Amino acid sequence: MSRTTGSDDTPRRPLSRERILAEALLLADRQGNAGLTMRALARALGVEAMSLYNHIASKDDLIDGMVESVVASIALPAPRGDWQAEMRKRALSMRAAFLTHPWAAPLMVSRINIGPNMLSLIDATLGCLHAAGFDHATADHVWNALDSHIYGFHLLERSFPLQPGQYAEAARQFLPNLPPDRYPHMHTLALMVAKGRHTGTHDFEFGLDLLLTALATMRSG
């Protein structure tokens, strides 16, 4: 007599650290970091929560592993060639990673991340800048200035209460609060947005290129 084929007979994929981290990324992408609990993760994997601890030491270990997974997708700057192009590539790669995983940036700036992927990214960044003629101390300042723009832009963008498609209408509604005799410059700018002559949207690459151009003057070589 043959066995009945049903859900109980379907072979289960073995649980592993890699599978847990992959599911955790999906869960955080859908629900944010606040929705990432060990119980919710276990439920998504179809296992008991305690079984996760055979592969994950703690919630902190889980988050560290998730951050490392995101960092692995960021392009490492090469130590030779056009340093500005390499830093630009790195910045755009980080931005793409944060847009894919919006929850990652706050965790990366609020924790000490010392996984091999993070350390490789930092070392490659410093190495590229040093090869370009920045001394190590200045390279540290350059790296931090660029990352402040990358992280800050992402966090501001996530927190801003309007979507780009809402700017023109919001400007039209706000114009009565900006009498031209009192706020002439804000009135002019809001009018430009309201009439479609200016988008009013924040431009990540504008700030990035501005920084790269200014930082070039600090090279010692």
Image: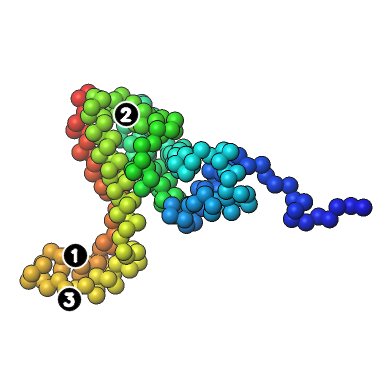
Residue drawn at the location 92% of the way across and 52% of the way down: 1
Earlier in the chain: of badge 1 and badge 2, it is 2
Label 3 near label 1: C-beta < 8 Å? no
Residue drawn at the location 44% of the way across and 41% of the way down: 60
6 lies left or right of 182: right
Q: Which residue is mark 1?
A: 189
**Residue type beneath disc 3:** Pro
Pinpoint residue 71: horizontal percent, then vertical percent. Answer: 43, 39
Residue drawn at the location 31% of the way across and 64% of the way down: 161
75 lies left or right of 38: left
Q: Quadrant of the C terminus?
A: top left
Cα separation between marks 1 and 3: 13 Å
Earlier in the chain: of badge 3 and badge 2, it is 2
Q: Which residue is mark 3?
A: 176
Label 2 near label 3: C-beta < 8 Å? no
Query: Is 206 in front, or is 155?
Result: 155
**Residue type beneath disc 1:** Leu
Q: Which residue is mark 2?
A: 126
Q: What crowding class fits label 2: few (fewer than 14 Cα within 10 Å), some (14-19), or many (20 or more)? A: many
Pinpoint residue 129: horizontal percent, then vertical percent. Answer: 30, 29
Determine whether the residue tagged by mark 1 lies in a helix, strand or loop: helix
**Residue type beneath disc 2:** Leu
* Residue 96 visible somewhere in the drawing: no
Query: Is 43 in front, or is 156?
Result: 43
Earlier in the chain: of badge 1 and badge 3, it is 3
Cα separation between marks 1 and 2: 40 Å
Pinpoint residue 218: horizontal percent, then vertical percent. Answer: 19, 31
Determine whether the residue tagged by mark 3 lies in a helix, strand or loop: helix
